[in-house]
Amino acid sequence: MKTLVIFYSLEGNCALIADILKSSLNAEVLEIKLQDERKRSRFGKFFWALSLTFSKKKIALKPYTVNIENYDLIILGAPVWAGAPAPIMASFLNQTKITGKKTGLFCTHGGGVRNALEKFETLLPGNTIAGKIDFVNPSQADKAGLKQKIDDWVKTLGG
C-alpha cells in the first residue's frame, strides 16, 4: 500500500510522529509549509497561532508537487490549537481536495485534545477514516513507548 504522511508542525511534535510513521510504513512525507516562515519567540508563536485560529484569514501556503491520487493511504497530522486541528491544516485541505481515500488522522497536544480529532474528520468528507490517534507532548515521551504506540496504531490502519 502506497502511503503519504501529510503534516504541519509548529514545535516539532507532528514532525516527530511523521518521521516515525515514515519509517514504520515506508511512507513518503509532505510537510505543509507557510509562505511566512518568520521565526517567532515562544510567546510570539502563541499569539500568532491564536490570531490564525480566530481570525479565519486565508493562510498562504508554499506550493508542493505531490500528486495525492498516487497514494492508497493518506495520514494527516496537525497540532491542536483551541480544541481543533491547527487552521493551517484546514487551509491545506481547502486548497487540496482529498476524496475517496483511506485516511488516518493524528493530533499532538499538550493535554487538551477535546474534540479535535472529530473536527479533523469533518475536514475530510468523502474519505474513509481508518483510524484516529492523539499524542500528548510526544517530544517529551519515552521514544520506545512512542514508537510502540505508533506501530500498534499503524496495524489498525491496515498499512
Image: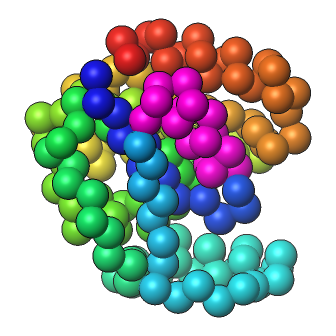
Identify whether 152 is placed above or below 106.
Answer: above
- Tell me, yes or no, if residue 54 can be seen here: no
Residue positioned 56% across, 42% down in the render: 18
Q: Which span of residues is magenta-colored?
A: 13-27
Residue 9 position by quadrant: bottom right
Q: Is residue 33 above or below residue 141?
A: below
Residue at horizontal 70 percent and vertical 23 percent from the top: 147
x then y, percent, for residue 48? 64, 82
Instruction: Confirm whether the magenta stretch covers residue 84.
Output: no
Q: Quick check: can you spot residue 91?
A: yes
- Secondary structure character of the magenta stretch overall: helix
Q: Is 18 one of the magenta-colored residues?
A: yes
In-front residue for pair 69/121: 69
Residue at the image point whose x is 73% and y is 74% from the top: 46
The image position of residue 6, as x and y in percent, is: 42, 49
Q: Nearer the viewer, residue 75 or 88?
A: 75
Q: Is residue 38 above or below residue 75?
A: below
Quadrant of residue 153 within the rendered picture? top right
The residue sitting at 68% across, 34% down in the picture is 135
The correct choice, above or below, for 106 with respect to 91 in the image is above
